[in-house]
Amino acid sequence: MPRVSALHIYPVKSCGGLNVQCVRLEEHGPEFDRRFMVVDGTGRFLTQRQEPRLALVRPTLVRPTLLLDAPGMRQIEVALSGGGRGRVPIQVWSHSGEAEYVGEEPAGWFSEYLGRGCRLVRWGEDEVRFCDPTYARFESQVAFADGFPVLLISEASLRDLNGRMDAAVPMDRFRPNIVVQDCEPYAEDNWKQIRIGDLLFDVVKPSSRCVTTTVDQSTGEVGKEPLKTLATYRKRGNAVFFGQNCIHHGPGMVRVGDEVRVTETA
C-alpha cells in the first residue's frame, strides 16, 4: 500500500521549502503554501526561472510571523496575516488580480538581494483564482501556485530517473507537496482519484517541468539536468512531465505515514 513519506510547503513562491509532518488542506491548497510571492515593478511574478537565487531564501514559520533568511542578508520578519499596506495589481501566468502589499521593508530586502526593484505580496483571502476547468472536475481554487493546489510525486519515480543519470538529483528539485513511497515508478501517472487519510484528491494533470528543476536548491547554481534526461523518455509535444497535479475535495489533514488508497485509475 502506498504511503505518504514526506510533506512540503513553500510559503513564498519559488523560495525555499519546509518539511512538515502534517498539513491542513484549505480552500486554496496546503495551509501557508505559496501564500507569498515576489513580483517585479509591474506586479508580474518572479520565480527561479528568472532569479535562481530565490532558491536560497529560507523561510521559517514562527506563528504569527514568517521569518526569511538569505545569504548575506539580515533576517526579516513578515506577518502571516494582517498589517497589509493596501492592494497592488499582480499577474501569475494568465491570472490578473490583486494581492496584499506587505510593506517597504520586505520590498527593500528582496530588491537588495536580487539586485532589482521588486515587492513581496501576500495572497488576499477574498481573492479568487480558479484552477483550469479543462482539468478540474469541480470548481476549485488555487493561490500563487502555478496552476493547481497540490503536486504529488513518488519516490520510485525519482529513483528511476536518477538511475538514468550520471549524478542523482534530490526530490527538492521538483518542489512537491506530497511525496509517496511503496509504489511502482510512475504509478501516479495512472491514478485518477486517491484518498489520503479521510481526504479525497482528484489527480488531474501531469506536471510539465521547467528550468526550475535544473536549479540546485542548495547553491542556486543552474545546470542541464534533470531536464536533459527527462526529455529522452518523458517528453510529450514540447514539454516533459514528472509528477502529478492534484485537487483536493474540501478541507482536511494529511500526515506523513498516511495510506494512499487509489480509488480510481485512468
Image: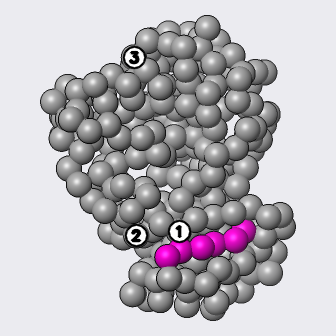
Q: Are marks 1 and 2 in contact (CB under 8 Å)?
A: yes
**Is 254 displayed left or right of 17 in the figure?**
right
Residue at 34% x, 56% y is 215
**Residue 70 lies in magenta, yes or no?**
yes
Up-down relation of residue 207 to residue 121 (above or below): above
> Mark 3 highlights which residue?
185
Label 3 residue SS? loop
**Alpha-carbon span between mark 1 and mark 2:** 7 Å
Residue 244: horizontal and vertical position, in percent? 46, 30
- The N terminus, quarter of image: top right
> Mark 2 highlights which residue?
53
Q: Which mark is residue 235?
A: none
> Mark 1 highlights which residue?
57
Q: Amino acid at mark 2?
A: Arg
Residue 117: horizontal and vertical position, in percent? 44, 88
Res 13 visible: no
Q: Are marks 3 and 2 in contact (CB under 8 Å)?
A: no
**Residue 259 lies in magenta, yes or no?**
no
Q: Which residues are magenta?
A: 66-71
Q: Amino acid at mark 1?
A: Val
**Is 210 displayed left or right of 86 in the figure?**
left
Up-down relation of residue 202 to residue 237 (above or below): above
**Alpha-carbon span between mark 3 and mark 1:** 31 Å
Q: Nearer the viewer, residue 261 or 41?
A: 261
Residue at 47% x, 51% y is 146
Q: Amino acid at mark 3?
A: Pro
